[in-house]
Amino acid sequence: MFDSSVEVENIDNQDKHQFWQNHVAAWEQSGIRQSEYCSRQGLNIKVFGYWKRKLCRKPAGMTFVPVAIKPSQSTVVKPMSTLRLIIRGGSCIEIGDGFNQDTLRRVLDTVGWTP
């Protein structure tokens, strides 16, 4: 069996990403088991699994919420006028004076934060 991981080691990260992205997409379209696809393509199943997880990783429950941004009346920010919330995983939300409570609630609901 040919181990493509040895061959792929010699290409740059962008090309590796594209190489594995193409294989994961082809496998998904093939309708066959992962092990069978890897065997047919001469791919190392463990390396394929690693890239499949890496490329298909999606934060659980994460969606984008549209936020309207209005120009500030003043471009000067007072030193203590910002509240910073640090959420699980290191995400950070900074909230300035005069924030919209509904927008903040939607953002917090989206990231799964509950008081």
Image (spheres, helix red, strand yellow):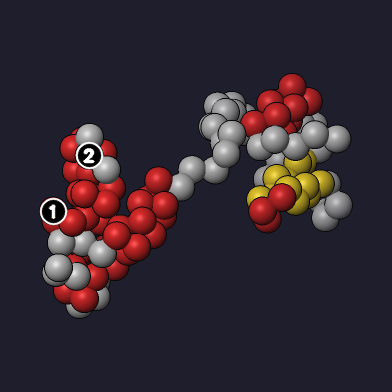
Q: Within 10 angstroms of label 1, few (less than 14), some, or many (20 or more) residues?
A: few
Q: Name the residue under label 1.
A: 40
Answer with left or right where residue 4 lies relative to residue 88: left
Q: Within 10 angstroms of label 2, few (less than 14), some, or many (20 or more) residues?
A: few
Q: Name the residue under label 2.
A: 32
Q: Nearer the viewer, residue 32 or 74?
A: 32
> Considering only order in the chain, which callout, 2 or 1, is on the residue closer to the N terminus?
2
Q: Can residue 107 be seen in this view?
A: no
In the rendered image, the residue lying farthest to the top is 102
Secondary element type, mark 1 = helix
Rendered-image quadrant of the C terminus: top right
Secondary element type, mark 2 = loop
Residue drawn at 71 percent across, 40 percent down: 74
Q: Is residue 11 above or below residue 88?
A: below
User: What amino acid is at disc 2?
Assistant: Ile
Contact, mark 1 vs mark 2 (Cβ under 8 Å): yes
Which of the 4 image quarters holds residue 25? Answer: top left
Q: Is residue 105 above or below residue 78?
A: above
Q: Nearer the viewer, residue 43 or 52?
A: 43
User: What amino acid is at disc 1?
Assistant: Arg
Residue drawn at 40 percent across, 46 percent down: 56
Residue drawn at 35 percent across, 51 percent down: 52
Percent x, y for residue 44? 26, 64
Rendered-image quadrant of the N terminus: bottom left
For marks 1 and 2, give the CA distance.
11 Å
Percent x, y for residue 28? 26, 39
Q: Which of 20 and 72 is in front in this view?
A: 20
